[in-house]
Image (cartoon, coloured by chain):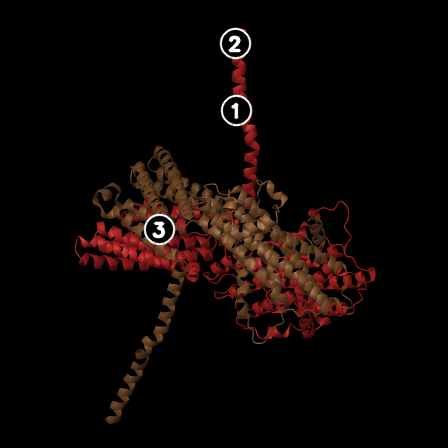
Chain colours: A brown, B red
Amino acid sequence: MESTSLEKTGFFARAWLPLKSLPEKLKPKVAELASQIIKLGKDDPRRVAHSLKVGLALNVVSLLFYLLPLYNDFGVSAAWALMTVVFVFEYSVGATLGKGLNRGFATLIGGALSVVAHQIACLSGEIAEPIMLGFFVFLQAAASTFIRFFPKIKAKYDYALVIFILTFSMISASGFRDDDIIKIASRRLSTVLIGGSVCVIICILICPVWAGLDLHNLIAANIEKLGNFLQEFGNEFFKTPKEGETEDDRSFLQQYKSVLTSKSTEESLANHAKWEPGHGQFQFRHPWNLYLKIGTLTRQCAYRIDALNGYLNTEIQTSSEMRHKIEEVYREMSLESGKALKELALAIKTMGQPSAATSIHLKNSKSAAKSLSSLFKSNVWGDTDLAAAVPVATVASLLIDVVACTEKIAQSVYELASMANFKSIDATLSPEKSQIRQQDDVKPPAKVDCPYVCVTVNEPTPAISGNENPSLTMATRISDS
Amino acid sequence: MESTSLEKTGFFARAWLPLKSLPEKLKPKVAELASQIIKLGKDDPRRVAHSLKVGLALNVVSLLFYLLPLYNDFGVSAAWALMTVVFVFEYSVGATLGKGLNRGFATLIGGALSVVAHQIACLSGEIAEPIMLGFFVFLQAAASTFIRFFPKIKAKYDYALVIFILTFSMISASGFRDDDIIKIASRRLSTVLIGGSVCVIICILICPVWAGLDLHNLIAANIEKLGNFLQEFGNEFFKTPKEGETEDDRSFLQQYKSVLTSKSTEESLANHAKWEPGHGQFQFRHPWNLYLKIGTLTRQCAYRIDALNGYLNTEIQTSSEMRHKIEEVYREMSLESGKALKELALAIKTMGQPSAATSIHLKNSKSAAKSLSSLFKSNVWGDTDLAAAVPVATVASLLIDVVACTEKIAQSVYELASMANFKSIDATLSPEKSQIRQQDDVKPPAKVDCPYVCVTVNEPTPAISGNENPSLTMATRISDS
């Protein structure tokens, strides 16, 4: 007996144990999930605001059901207003406006055409009517679906085409069972308009998220990240590796990596920004395409920086005399282009004309590149074999590329400052910078004086650019300056 | 009188002229549009088939309206079936299945929860009911919208969350006006299931487009493009530029550029492929992630090739003795890795084990890289200054990288061949290749013998890779071989 009771106790205890420990096992998982949620919200509190806004918009539109007079007007069609809110309400104002306008116009055109199709089908008699309707639905769906394959149309009007197919098919089919097709079409149009307007109004009035502002800040932040890397590159490349130093200590150098993959973010932000009305310091026709151009140039520069990053742990096998010489030049090139980039980032951020310091840094970096070229021609390398010279030479050609990239970025930022009427330099000058300006009256590069250049944005191939040969262009570029 | 009549004639003639010429002006535009449409269809005839399939699916679902017994069952809810077809029918089977399953499950869960919410709200009395309902709608919409910000969830279940919000809000709100909420919910679920099933059936039965097959072919084609470039690179680099030769003559060399930007296409194809059932030679759990790994390695190789492409027009300023020596080695490295890549592409295309010739080409390219290294250490460069040596040295380090990349790609392809049970080599051997095999009994690289390696797919940074220093790894890599 005793042993059986013990066995029983043992059985229950065994069964109970995992259940008892369950809350303790779940605890860390729940805690982790909670911390993830908090992190997501803290990283960008606008996400929380957006979630609440969607909830609010759905509730406002639900009034079409809850308030009897409204429900009497719209009936079950009120569901379309809910649907519009769910599909149209996007994170940024631009995306919401773009989808709302696409949906509104597509519903209008789809509705009108389906009414016409219905009238034609009615003329053909009761038996032929569904056949005619089916034919029209087939025709418009196939044609619209095919049009969606055009890349340019897909980029801008894909959603409109989907809604066009939907509206046309649904009103045609509903019209077959309900003769008052005009009423169906107008109810659908008005509910879509109500839903769309609620989205747009709530999106703009409560904590608006402007895609344009996000793009503006992203571009400035990316340029700044490259500047940070370049300011530190000289120190890191020439320092002797210390023991006990881990990769973590240099994680600040790796910030630039996010720039390498920001292309699609920039493009979608620019697409949305074009739908946005003027807001803050941005006019309606703000030159958003120029941001894409600057983004592309920044990414080209980032590809070189990524290559440079690969040489950070190289042991430099040259004579100490030579090492001393190149150290000075390499440091100067990298530091000065880094400073120039950070000045440019600051100019974009504050929407002021780039400071005079920018052109001084640009000039310094170019003259350093020039002295590097003569250093290489001087042939003081002695018996250094080529295998040892390869990294030194490659870093040189990458740095020369970086200097050239920096100048291109500077030109585009000057162009942007002129086209977007950035504040004049005097308004944004800090006392320190105005001193620099008095010391040296350097003009921005000549090309900048003709601001209205046609902008074509093509993402060039990454890595070392197209048909440009660093060592050849080294000569041309330097003789230009 | 006469002059007035003449004037009148003149007036009409002037008004008529632009109208008369209108058709002629429109003609070229219409012709251009037509040729664009024809090109789009010819490039991939499956696009035409897809458009027709969408039209067919919409017509099948429209029967819910046209056939009276069906309409009596579903009523206006039949519109949800149309809506499901419009939103769920995608180009590939995988994408359609993924969206259909997302939509089906989200409707099921959203519907069930909204019924529960409705019951709770009903308990709270007539006045409090809409307030409770509004609260629930707000809560679920805000929570679901916030969850959509998690990147992992967004990638896979974004559509499910949107449909969940929609279903919950709509059934809750409709339930307020119509007490038979179970009927509303079940009608919505059944119409969504009908629409989804029609999509999936038509998508699979009529000219199915398999995302998996597309991914398979894309990866093989990309490797082949790199092979084509490398096979020609030696010739192009060392030939003296002829007069009258334009960029067009070498456009075949630029095919590789599409590889640089194929990342997002590969990822979305792989995402869709994972939803697909077994088809043709592909099992249900085909190792699609391995394709992404191969794709990433191929792109890394393409970044080097892009850099090589930048050196095609360089004038080589070395002594003719040196030039002769490097020419032989450079040609061998590039040609042999090109051939190896093309063999690998062929193996993927035919789903056969990589041929024995592959490992011969790999071996040859590695031994060429080895002799290059000793050539560089021999210091026969004489007085060549460093500025002139930079391009030669950079091309060398890029070629060494390409050889290493090729080997990595080969290893992953061997891994794929083993995991996906590609046909044994004997079954696919052409007579020519079996001769090669008899001549030389080379084994594939040793690492390949352990096929079940954990695959982590991270897109590495483009351009010259992360922390690898070509000149340093040159030594290690060659001493390995």
Residue carrying label 3: A86
Estimate how packed mark 3 is, as few (under 14), some (14 to 19) or many (20 or more) residues with alpha carbons within 10 Å: many
Which image quarter: residue B450?
bottom right
Q: Is residue B323 above or below residue B55?
A: below
Check if mark 3 and mark 2 are on a common chain.
no
Residue A215 image position (x, y, % from top left): 48, 51
- Residue B10 as seen in the image, left or right of residue B471: left
Element at label 2:
helix
Amino acid of disc 2 = Thr
Residue carrying label 1: B19
Element at label 3:
helix
Q: Is residue A244 above or below residue B245?
A: below
Residue carrying label 2: B4
Which image quarter: residue B311?
bottom right
Mark 2 → mark 1, Cα distance in angstroms: 23 Å
Q: Nearer the viewer, residue B260 or B81?
A: B260
Q: Is residue B11 above or below residue B455?
A: above
Q: Chain of mark 2?
A: B
Amino acid of disc 3 = Val
Amino acid of disc 1 = Leu
Which quadrant does the C terminus of chain B fall into? bottom right
Which image quarter: residue B109?
bottom left
Residue B259 in view (yes/no): no
Residue ID at (26%, 91%) = A4
- Residue B451 as seen in the image, left or right of residue B355: left
Q: Chain of mark 1?
A: B
Residue A254 image position (x, y, % from top left): 54, 64
Q: Nearer the viewer, residue B249 or B358?
A: B249
